[in-house]
Image: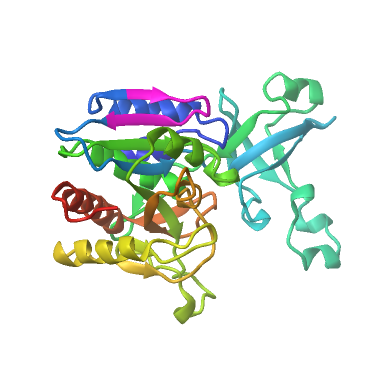
Amino acid sequence: MLLKRLTEAMGPSGYEDEIRQVIYEEVKDYADRVYTDAMGNLFAEVDGTRPGPKVMLCAHMDEVSLFITQVEANGLIKFRHLGGIDDRVLLSKPVLIGEKKIHGVIGSKPPHHQSSGERKNPVGLDQLRIDIGATTREEALQHVKPGDVAVFATTYEEIGHRRAKSKSFDDRVGCAVMVETIKKKFDIPVVYAFTVQEEIGLRGAGPAAYRINPDLALVLEGTLASDVPDTVEHGQATICGGGPALSIMDGSSVHSRKFLKEMIEVAEGADIPYQIRKTVAGGNDAGRIHLTKEGILSGVISVPTRYIHAPSQLISLDDYEQTIQLVEQFLRRVEQGGFQS
């Protein structure tokens, strides 16, 4: 299954080799050209039957992950974040390290050895170690070295009523939407850009947009779903199962009102459920794309994702499939000349 293949692939920021190869295998038979750039972005170009307007679809390949910094004398491993991770979700989580995917588990001092003061505070990153079962530094270094990267060892599974859990739905769900979209035929040129290093500063999207120089750009992203405990109802960003989320603004850009209006018309015209993302927290590749060259008209469609940036994330399969439908209908509208930059 596509979502399983994409979410379970390894792809830390700056180390997207495995996930890039998985996506390449998925898209190579549907594109006129497939290539990479110096950053590691993957491009799949489909020419269409007429010259334009040219549309850039964008989703980032990388995932929040861990970076190995030191192996201690007792064989335990120190690490740091690659991307934004809450330390409180790390304890006891299984991980896979490096190209050989060495199994490890994140641990810390058990409560039996903690003082009463320590038990009142969250465990911090400096108190955590990855344990691969080694008893000495020399033994651990046979398998893991500083500079290696680790990802969470969460597998894909469909659970409950039309829900799926896995790691890295941010943003493998956007990548999956693009893979499904490239299989459809459009008269206009569409460039599918699978970008790198979004989680550490939107680094791949700017060079990608500069190379493509599109008339329009649409970013597909996993975004925070706030229908979880202790979230004030009127402040919820999105809800899981409420349909694709359309953005007004976020921490990296104020989105085009024209784009938003057109997208709402497309959704309502095709009877596709949608919701407005009700927060400005976070950012995505549109923040870099819309500033490229003379400026690029950009918009964002997001799939609500519970527990985003955590080892296990959850999405609605209905939201996912409706996002695919909305992207197709948007491209049909552009194809028919109904949306111009």
- Which residue is at the front of the view, 3 or 222? 222
Residue 28, image x and y in percent?
A: 28, 24
Q: In which quarter of the view is residue 225 placed?
A: bottom left
Residue 132, image x and y in percent?
A: 67, 32
Describe residue 120's horizontal placement relative to residue 278 as left or right. right
* Residue 38 lies in the magenta stretch: yes
Residue 212, image x and y in percent?
A: 38, 35
Note whether 4 is above or below 285 in the view shown: above
Which segment is the magenta one? 34-45
Q: In which quarter of the view is residue 94 placed?
A: top right
Type of colouring: rainbow
Query: Which residue is situated farthest in the front direction here?
Result: 294
Q: How many numbered marks appear?
A: 0
The answer to whether residue 133 is visible is yes
Q: In which quarter of the view is residue 42 placed?
A: top left
- Which residue is at the front of the view, 297 or 79? 297
- Which residue is at the front of the view, 158 or 250? 250
- Which residue is at the front of the view, 184 or 45? 45
Quarter holding the N terminus is top left
* Residue 226 lies in the magenta stretch: no
Residue drawn 64% across the image and 40% down it: 66
Residue drawn 38% across the image and 49% down it: 219
Describe residue 151's horizontal placement relative to residue 224 as left or right. right
Describe residue 204's horizontal placement relative to residue 20 as left or right. right
Residue 271, image x and y in percent?
A: 16, 65
The answer to whether residue 242 is visible is no
Residue drawn 38% across the image and 23% down it: 35
